[in-house]
Image (cartoon, rainbow, N blue to C red):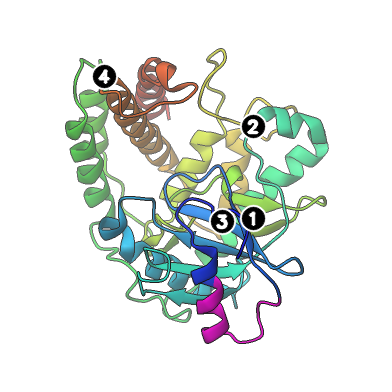
């Protein structure tokens, strides 16, 4: 028998499957643990005592809606592995739900640190903090330089009308969790719709590109970009806008939302934008729209969390304070759009 089973992963069945599909890979009993920190899909570290791997599967109880995600995630990581974008090497995709109760894929384990808080960055000092954040920008440039057709990802998304679809999608998300007056949110949504920029040529878009979704080594090199569940083909500047948003200081005491921007040495948003523009050659003159859209999107996500909290569907530390953050994000979005 194997060790205690982590929730959602049957280690005995996994061992049997790996022995059939990749004979000789596993050399001893499997042990595994759930890696905390993911947004939705579940991530496990698995070891046979010698080698380590990572297993990804959909969240418990939501298999049908997200089964497709595993195939997409596995596909984009596998396609990007030969490129300059640092991603783990994938080993296999299993679409047979009999093995662990859901589709899953296995990839190599990559050592590195996901910097989630300003405190973590403060501990490594201002110079290394600066290097880590600038490396993040450079990695984004590498991702957006990949030719989707050459990587075998020409049909990975529908780039035509991408921004319009995104705006409508997040408007519907907002409507699904309306249970209070939110000053300015409809004004922000409408203003974004009126000022829709013209998208540059489409690229592979990560969709949630930020410091805690990459693994960084002690030399501040990015070893792996993780969490590709939002990836598609679309407007690359949506990734830049999100990165700029996460690089702005919230100035909210004891915020339950992690932001690293207050760490000493963290580059200002303007420097990140300039570095991206210089290295990618893209026109970033409309970056304020993309940043305002990122503020809007996060406001909608947080309002959804707050709505579920009011229904008693979300428990845990900090959820009681999410609701008070939403107006802060709306205000940032409006200010960004008005002032540029």
Q: CA distance from mark 1 to mark 3?
A: 28 Å
Identify which residue, 172 or 236, lies in the foreground: 172
Residue located beneath label 2 in the image: 117
In the rendered structure, which disc, 2 or 4, sits on the residue that comes first in sequence?
2
Determine crowd level at label 3: few under 14, some 14-19, many 20+ residues with C-alpha closer than 10 A.
many
Residue located beneath label 3 in the image: 44
Question: Residue 268 vs residue 20: left or right?
Answer: right
The mark closer to the camera, 1 or 3, is: 3
- What x and y, as percent, mark residue 207? 43, 52
The mark closer to the camera, 1 or 2, is: 2
- What x and y, as percent, mark residue 97? 35, 69
- Residue at (66% x, 69% y) in the render: 29
Instruction: Write the start and end of the magenta stretch as one range.
Output: 15-27
Quadrant of the frame with the N terminus: bottom right
The mark closer to the camera, 4 or 3, is: 3
- Residue at (66% x, 77% y) in the render: 26
Residue located beneath label 4 in the image: 184
Identify which residue, 96 or 76, lies in the foreground: 96
The residue sitting at the front extreme is: 1
The residue sitting at the top extreme is: 253
In the rendered structure, which disc, 4 or 1, sits on the residue that comes first in sequence?
1
Question: On residue 138, which mark appears?
Answer: 1
Residue 65 appears in the picture as rendered: yes
User: For residue 37, which quarter of the picture?
Assistant: top right
- What x and y, as percent, mark residue 36? 56, 43
Determine crowd level at label 1: few under 14, some 14-19, many 20+ residues with C-alpha closer than 10 A.
some
Q: CA distance from mark 4 to mark 3?
A: 40 Å
Determine crowd level at label 2: few under 14, some 14-19, many 20+ residues with C-alpha closer than 10 A.
some
The mark closer to the camera, 2 or 4, is: 2
Question: Residue 265 vs residue 36: left or right?
Answer: right
In the rendered structure, which disc, 4 or 3, sits on the residue that comes first in sequence?
3
């Amino acid at each position: 028998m194997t060790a205690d089973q982590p929730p959602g992963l049957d280690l005995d069945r996994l061992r049997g499957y790996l022995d059939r599909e990749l004979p000789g890979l596993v050399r001893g009993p499997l042990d595994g643990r759930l890696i905390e920190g993911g947004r939705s899909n579940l991530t496990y570290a698995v070891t046979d005592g010698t080698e380590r791997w990572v297993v990804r599967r959909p969240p418990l109880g939501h298999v049908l809606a997200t089964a497709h995600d595993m195939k997409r995630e596995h596909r984009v990581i596998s396609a990007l592995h030969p490129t300059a974008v640092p991603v783990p090497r994938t080993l296999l995709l299993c679409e047979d739900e009999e093995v662990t109760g859901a589709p899953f894929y296995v990839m190599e384990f990559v050592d590195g640190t996901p910097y989630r808080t300003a405190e973590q960055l403060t501990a490594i000092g201002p110079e290394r903090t600066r290097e880590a954040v600038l490396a993040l920008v450079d990695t984004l440039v590498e991702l957006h330089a990949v030719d989707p057709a050459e990587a075998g990802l020409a049909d990975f998304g529908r780039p035509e009308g991408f921004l319009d679809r995104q705006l409508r999608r997040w408007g519907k998300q907002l409507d699904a969790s309306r249970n209070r007056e939110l000053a300015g949110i409809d004004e922000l949504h409408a203003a974004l719709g009126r000022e829709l920029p013209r998208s540059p040529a489409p690229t592979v878009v990560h969709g949630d590109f930020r410091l805690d979704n990459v693994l960084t080594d002690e030399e501040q090199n990015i070893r792996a970009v993780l969490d590709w569940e939002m990836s598609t083909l679309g407007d690359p500047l949506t990734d830049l806008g999100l990165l700029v948003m996460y690089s702005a200081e919230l100035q909210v005491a004891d915020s339950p939302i992690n932001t690293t921007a207050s760490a000493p040495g963290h580059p200002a948003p303007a420097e990140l934008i300039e570095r991206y523009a210089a290295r990618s050659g893209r026109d970033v003159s409309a970056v304020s729209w993309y940043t305002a859209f990122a503020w809007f999107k996060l406001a909608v996500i947080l309002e959804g969390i707050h709505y579920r909290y009011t229904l008693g569907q979300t428990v845990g530390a900090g959820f009681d304070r999410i609701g008070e953050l939403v107006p802060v994000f709306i205000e940032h979005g409006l200010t960004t759009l008005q002032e540029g």
